[in-house]
Amino acid sequence: MKILKFNAIWCSGCLVMKPIINEIKKLYPNIQFIDYDYDIDEEMVNKWEVGTLIPVMIFVDENDKEITRLRGEKTKKEIIDTIEGIINEKN
């Protein structure tokens, strides 16, 4: 699984989530987290139809097929629950 994270330097929710994501990365070293800047990575923003509400986290499988996405500021628990739900569904 990979998590595509769309953020911007001006986004307050993105800044709030940054330390939360860093904690989650340590808990799930096998998950690849890929950061995209909303203002710079326009091609990826359009490809994944991110829209204007950020941050956005798109969970994709090994074939880059979208599993689910989270929009807006989320808690550590919400993100972990999403990850665990995907992991449990695969097993």
Image (tube, rainbow, N blue to C red):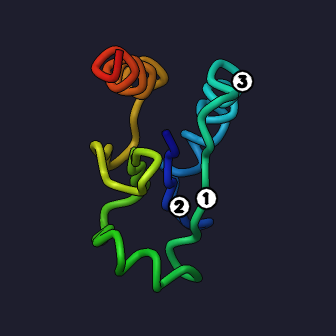
Which amino acid does the dot numbered 1 rest on? Asp
Q: Is residue 85 above or below residue 36?
A: above
Mark 1, other Cα within 10 Å: few <14 / some 14–19 / many ≥20: some
Of tags 1 and 2, the one toward the viewer is 1
Q: Work out whether mark 1 precedes mark 2 in sequence or the reverse, and give the earlier one.
A: 2
Q: Residue at x 39, y 51 (%)?
A: 58
Q: Secondary structure at mark 2?
A: strand
Image-quadrant location for residue 45:
bottom left
- The vertical placement of 63 against 37, above or below, is above
Residue 2 pos. (x, y %): 52, 45
Check disc 1 and report the residue beneath it.
35
Callout 3 secondary element: helix
Judging from the image, what secondary structure is the residue with disc 1 in? Answer: strand
Real-space Cα separation, disc 3 to disc 1, in angstroms: 16 Å
Q: Is residue 50 left or right of residue 14?
A: left
Q: Residue beneath label 2, please? A: 7
Q: Is residue 31 above or below residue 62?
A: above
Q: Residue at x 72, y 24 (%)?
A: 26
Characterize the local packing of mark 3: few (<14), some (14-19) or many (20 or more) Cα atoms within 10 angstroms.
Answer: few
Query: Tag 3: residue type?
Result: Lys
Residue 56, horizontal then vertical, whole percent? 39, 54
Task: Tell which circle, 3 or 2, labels the residue nearer the N-terminal end.
Answer: 2
Q: Which is more N-terminal, label 1 or label 3?
A: 3
The Cα–Cα distance between marks 1 and 2, rounded to whole angstroms, is 7 Å
- Disc 1 and disc 2 in contact, CB within 8 angstroms: yes
Which label sits in the foreground, 3 or 2?
3
Give the residue pinned by disc 3.
26
